[in-house]
Amino acid sequence: MRPLAHGAAHHCFGCGKANRSGLRLNFLVSDEGLIVCRTKIPARFEGPPGYVHGGVIATLLDEAMSKANRACNVIAMTRHLEVDYRRPVPLRSTIEITARHLKAEGRKHFCEAEIRLHGETLASGKALFIAVTKQFLLSRTKD
Ligand SMILES: CCCCCCCCCC(=O)SCCNC(=O)CCNC(=O)[C@H](O)C(C)(C)COP(=O)(O)OP(=O)(O)OC[C@H]1O[C@@H](n2cnc3c(N)ncnc32)[C@H](O)[C@@H]1OP(=O)(O)O
C-alpha cells in the first residue's frame, strides 16, 4: 500500500488538510487500486449517542469511492449514492474504510465501499460517478 496522491482541494470536508472542522482522512492505495483508510471519528461527528452520524457515514463511503476513481486517474462527481447501514459505527474506534472502482461505461463510473470494525462490516455503499473535466470541477472556485 502507498499514500494516494489525489489532488483534492485543501479544504475538502473529507480529506482537506486545511479544513480543521473536517474529517481529514488519509488514504492508501494498493497496486490493484484498492483504497484503504484507517481512522477514528471524533465525537463532534456524533449522531446516535456514542455513534457516528449517518450523514458522516455516507460521507466516509462517498469520499473513499471518490478516491477509487482518482486511483484510476478519473475526476468524477457523485451522481447517485446508496448506503446500507448495517450496524452503528462507533465513535473513537479505529475503523477501516475500503473502496474499489468496479467498472466504467463511458463517463459513468461505478464504485463500492465498506466500513469495517474488527472484520465486521458496519456499513456499505455503492455509487455512480460521472466523469467531469477539471475545468468544470473548478468553475466555482473564483467566486
Ligand atoms: C481533483 C480531484 C477532485 C475530486 C472531487 C471529488 C468529489 C467527491 C465526491 C462528491 O461528493 S461530489 C459532490 C456531490 N455531487 C454533486 O454535487 C454532483 C451534482 N450533479 C451534477 O453536477 C451533475 O449531475 C453531474 C455533473 C454529476 C452529471 O451531469 P451531466 O449533465 O454531465 O450528466 P447526466 O446527469 O446527464 O448523467 C450522465 C449519465 O448518467 C446517467 N445516470 C444518471 N443518473 C443515473 C442513475 N441513477 N443510474 C444510472 N444512470 C444514471 C444518465 O442517464 C447519463 O447517461 P448517458 O450518458 O448514457 O446519457
Image (tube, grey):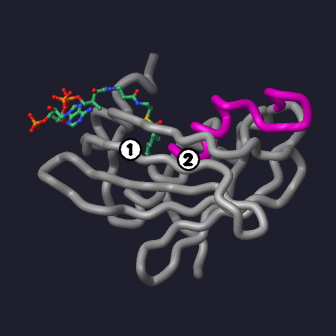
- 92 w.r.t. 33: above or below: above
Viewer-proximal residue, 123 or 132? Answer: 123
Amino acid type of the residue tagged 2 in the rendering:
Leu
Residue 38 picture location, percent across and down: 73, 63
Pointers 2 and 1 in contact (C-beta within 8 Å): yes
The location of residue 3, given as percent across then percent down, is 60, 72
* Mark 2 neighbour density, 10 Å: few (under 14) some (14–19) many (20 or more): many
For the point 31% across and 56% down, which residue is it?
Answer: 74
| Image quadrant where one finds the C terminus | top left
Q: Is residue 126 left or right of residue 58?
A: left
On the picture, is 33 further left or further right than 41? left
The residue sitting at 51% across, 43% down in the picture is 62
* Label 1 crowd bin: few (<14), some (14–19), many (20+), radius 10 Å: many
Above or below: residue 34 compared with residue 89: below
For mark 1, give the secondary structure: strand
Label 2: which residue?
A: 61
Amino acid at the residue labelled 1:
Ala
Q: Is residue 34 magenta?
A: no
**In the displayed structure, would residue 36 be above or below residue 104?**
below
Residue 48: where, in percent of width, then height?
A: 83, 28
The residue at 38%/44% (across/down) is 127
Disc on the earlier residue, 2 or 1: 2
Q: Is residue 11 visible?
A: no
Label annotation for residue 139:
none
Specify the farthest residue to the top. 143
Q: Which residues are magenta?
A: 46-63
Q: According to the image, label 1 marks what residue?
A: 127
Residue 73 appears in the picture as rendered: yes
Q: Mark 1: is the Cβ under 8 angstroms from ligand 1?
A: no
| Separation of marks 2 and 1 at Cα, in angstroms | 9 Å
Number of marks: 2
